[in-house]
Image: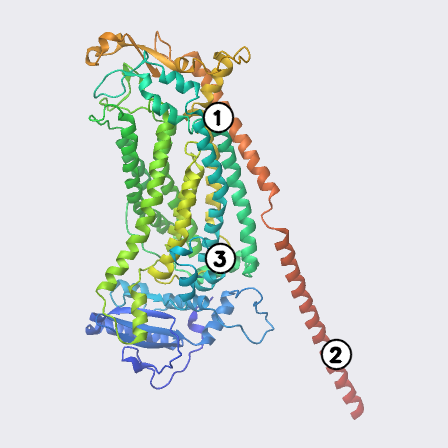
């Protein structure tokens, strides 16, 4: 495209002048509709330089065929903008904008269909951003204080408010076509995806709830729980440096029973089910997307058209502030430090308190680092200087997701695979800087720590985040309305109402997608440790759909519509999360849970190693086998431990020899089995994913047939029109020849 300079200039009346004059600067009719509004502070009217720059910019727009209307209130000056339909016809032909099913305009058609509001807003937004006055764009004038902002008007949203953007409509089907007609395809596809994701969470939530409830059958009957509850003579070695004393193993009876609610044999089945669920979800989503874009007549909208449209109708710059690229590194340090501090006043349950407080601190870190990571990602995108907004969005998506992934999952990775594994052993503990002793897993196992961390972070994120996401824009909007004086003019009142709404920026929808991607990660990654994750996600999404609807329709200014036929880079993000989920869940089952040690003990060391014994539980003696022995005389300061004079040996969770405290033969055998299980689990799960993806085609056969039928219909129409033109040309030649022969 060569720019808008080639467009014809619409000639106005003599009354058309600079829109800085009063409302009569442009004669308008009552039925006239304004699409865009520019806003400036009224204080600028007393500054000749800024007034001149406003006049220059508006004059440039007038030469391109725009009409203006000026309204003022006590503090602001509003410039209503509209353009003649001929401008939109030319731009629509250039943008190749599809208008919906059955309304595609063939080149031979003389009359164009009515211009949708989404197309009008896209075109106006493009022209406003590309127009320059004295070499300055609108963004430059905003920085200089000439203008304050610009935004499209909310018009015709009453139906969406009635049928969609209400809390009591939570159980209703979403009006996707109306959303598309008002916000454009990009926003509509987001809600299509979110609705489909929520529906697919139902079976995952039911299975996860069933797995969790099935653990109650082992609450009293588990052999391991029985042995722990009856172990009154077994003492555990002290964990922390404060309040050092021996603790009876039977004191952990309750936590041992709770651990078996989610750390049981069905965990493996649920992890494989979630790997299959993630694959089926993505494959069926691809089919659903194909049906939707075919219904919107976007199926044939190729990538070249997408590049042209995005480069013309989307912003090329966005502000993100300055920051240093240290977001990822800083995101995990607070949680690691918080988990390393022992609380002296909580002697009984120090590890539980540390994990709980660490999860709370980590949640606050996530909130802070989200803003930092966004600024870092935007800054890195600026360094790469992408050509188009679409390219910029793809790079920003990848960078921001990587930073957010570390911010959200660093503590979970630490607890699942590092916590308690580099601590050494009693009498020779690993210390940070030689001072602080590293924290250890809960006495009932690291699975309990991981469960608590997942429950706290996900619970807070789904509840507090949704509350803040709604209350912050609602309170901000109410605060601005509190000090605004309602004008008498209904048109000015409408413009002011739109101005008082919360501002939006090019990545506003991006934030909603990112929030859902992180939730999807919590739902699939480490789900083996927290089977209730899909259920929490389901409840959260039911609220999220209406929350986003209310924000977009009632609390925010209107988004500039964008055309799209898929969710873009987010699909690759979902596929990446699916693969990471298989790897993470396999490693959680192998290294964090007690599944592998229980199976190995049952068939190699337990009473059932020679065959089944119906009268004896196969896990009898497992607790004693899984605890190593440490002699209290080998403590560096045994006198400083309370009750050390009555205890000669204590136990701790590890597989070490009693004479030299080195790793025992069982440790290395278990390590080999764990590594073999991870490889086997990942191959089986990935094979299931590949087979499921192969059995479920991305595009339904009905969609393929409809596309072929449309192509055949268009080809037949072109052939028929070509035959008619050939026949007409032949008849004209015959008539001309007959006339000449008659003259001769």
Tag 3 and tag 2, C-beta contact below 8 Å? no
Q: Earlier in the sequence, mark 1 or mark 3?
A: 1
Mark found first going from the N terminus, 3 or 2:
3
Q: What percent of the width, then of the height, locates residue 597?
A: 45, 19
* Residue at the (43%, 44%) spot, across then down: 538
The percent position of residue 219, horizontal first and vertical second, equals 41, 25
Eyeballing the image, is 300 above or below 524?
below
Q: Label 1 belongs to which residue?
A: 265
Residue 453 position within the rendered picture, expressed as x and y whole percent measured from the top left? 34, 34
At a point 36% along the width and 42% down the height, the residue shown is: 403
Q: CA distance from mark 2 to mark 1?
A: 83 Å
Query: Tell me, what colour scheme is on the image?
Result: rainbow
- From this view, report whether residue 611 is shown above or below residue 550: above
Label 2 packing within 10 angstroms: few (<14), some (14-19), many (20+):
few
**Mark 3 residue crowding within 10 angstroms, few (<14) / some (14–19) / many (20+):** many
- Residue occupying the point 46% across, 55% down: 172
- Comparing marks 2 and 1, which lies closer to the viewer? 1
Residue 98, how many percent across, how many down?
53, 64
Q: Secondary structure at mark 2?
A: helix
Rendering quarter of residue 253: top left
Image marks 2 and 1: residues in contact by CB distance under 8 Å: no
The quadrant holding residue 683 is top right
Report helix, strand or loop for mark 3.
loop
719 with respect to 88 (left or right)? right
Mark 1–mark 3 Cα distance, whole angstroms, equals 45 Å
* Cα separation between marks 3 and 2: 45 Å
Q: Which residue is mark 3?
A: 564
Which residue is tagged 2?
Answer: 730
Asked if residue 574 can be seen in this view, the reply is yes
Q: Give the quarter of the figure containing the C terminus.
A: bottom right
């Amino acid at each position: 495209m060569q720019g808008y300079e080639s467009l014809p200039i619409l000639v106005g009346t003599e009354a058309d002048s600079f829109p800085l004059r009063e409302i009569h600067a442009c004669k308008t009719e009552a039925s006239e509709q304004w699409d865009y509004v520019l806003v400036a502070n009224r204080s600028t009217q007393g500054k000749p330089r800024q007034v001149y720059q406003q006049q220059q910019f508006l004059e440039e727009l007038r030469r391109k065929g725009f009409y203006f209307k000026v309204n003022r209130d006590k503090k602001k000056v509003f410039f209503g903008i509209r353009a003649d339909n001929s401008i939109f016809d030319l731009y629509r032909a250039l943008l190749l904008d599809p208008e919906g099913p059955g309304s595609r305009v063939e080149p031979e058609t003389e009359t164009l269909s009515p211009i949708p509001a989404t197309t009008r807003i896209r075109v106006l937004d493009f022209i406003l951003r590309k127009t320059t006055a004295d070499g300055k764009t609108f963004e430059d004038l905003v920085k200089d204080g000439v203008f304050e902002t610009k935004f499209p008007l909310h018009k015709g949203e009453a139906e969406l408010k009635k049928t969609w953007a209400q809390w009591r409509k939570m159980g209703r089907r979403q009006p996707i076509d109306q959303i598309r007609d008002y916000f454009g395809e990009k926003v509509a596809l987001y809600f299509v995806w979110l609705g489909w994701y929520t529906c697919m969470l139902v079976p995952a939530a039911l299975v996860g709830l069933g797995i969790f409830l099935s653990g109650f059958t082992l609450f009293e009957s588990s052999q391991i729980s029985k042995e722990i509850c009856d172990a009154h003579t077994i003492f555990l070695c002290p964990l922390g440096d404060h309040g050092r004393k021996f603790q009876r193993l039977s004191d952990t009876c309750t936590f041992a029973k709770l651990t078996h609610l989610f750390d049981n044999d069905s965990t493996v089945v649920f992890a494989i089910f979630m790997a299959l669920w993630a694959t089926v979800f993505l494959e069926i989503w691809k089919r659903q997307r194909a049906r939707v874009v075919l219904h919107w007549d976007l199926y044939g909208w190729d990538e070249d058209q997408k590049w042209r449209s995005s480069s013309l109708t989307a912003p090329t710059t966005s502000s993100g502030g300055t920051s240093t690229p240290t977001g990822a590194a800083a995101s995990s340090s607070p949680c690691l430090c918080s988990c390393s501090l022992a609380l002296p006043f909580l002697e009984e349950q120090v590890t539980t308190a540390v994990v709980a407080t660490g999860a709370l601190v980590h949640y606050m870190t996530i909130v802070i680092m989200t803003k930092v990571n966004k600024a870092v990602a935007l800054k890195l995108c600026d360094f790469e200087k992408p050509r188009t907004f679409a390219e910029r969005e793809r790079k920003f998506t990848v960078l921001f997701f990587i930073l957010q992934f570390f911010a959200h999952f660093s503590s979970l990775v630490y607890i699942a695979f590092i916590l308690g594994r580099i601590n050494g052993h009693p009498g020779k503990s690993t210390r940070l800087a030689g001072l602080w002793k590293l924290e250890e897993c809960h006495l009932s196992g690291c699975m309990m720590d991981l469960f608590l961390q997942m429950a706290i972070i996900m619970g807070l994120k789904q509840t507090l985040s949704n509350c803040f996401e709604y209350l912050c824009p609602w309170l901000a909007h109410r605060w601005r309305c509190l000090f605004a004086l309602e004008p008498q003019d209904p048109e000015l009142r409408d413009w002011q109402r739109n101005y008082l709404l919360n501002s939006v920026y090019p990545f506003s929808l991006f934030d909603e997608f990112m929030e859902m991607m992180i939730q999807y990660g919590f739902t699939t990654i480490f789900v083996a440790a927290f089977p209730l994750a899909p259920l929490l996600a389901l409840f959260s999404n039911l609220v999220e759909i209406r929350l986003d609807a209310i924000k977009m329709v009632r609390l925010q200014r209107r988004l500039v519509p964008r055309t799209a036929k898929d969710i873009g880079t987010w699909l690759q993000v979902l596929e990446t999360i699916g693969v990471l989920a298989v790897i993470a869940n396999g490693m959680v089952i192998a290294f964090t849970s007690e599944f592998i040690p229980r199976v190995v003990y049952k068939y190699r060391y337990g009473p059932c190693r020679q065959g089944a014994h119906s009268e004896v539980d196969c896990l009898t003696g497992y607790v004693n086998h899984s605890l190593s022995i440490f002699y209290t005389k080998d403590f560096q300061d045994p006198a400083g431990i309370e009750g050390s004079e009555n205890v000669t040996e204590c136990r701790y969770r590890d597989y070490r020899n009693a004479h030299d405290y080195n790793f025992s033969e069982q440790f290395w055998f278990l390590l080999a089995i764990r590594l073999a299980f991870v490889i086997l689990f990942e191959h089986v799960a990935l094979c299931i994913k590949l087979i499921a993806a192969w059995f479920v085609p991305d595009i339904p056969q009905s969609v393929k047939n409809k596309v072929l039928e449309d192509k055949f219909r268009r080809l037949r129409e072109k052939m028929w029109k070509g035959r008619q033109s050939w026949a007409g040309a032949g008849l004209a030649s015959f008539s001309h020849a007959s006339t000449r022969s008659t003259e001769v």
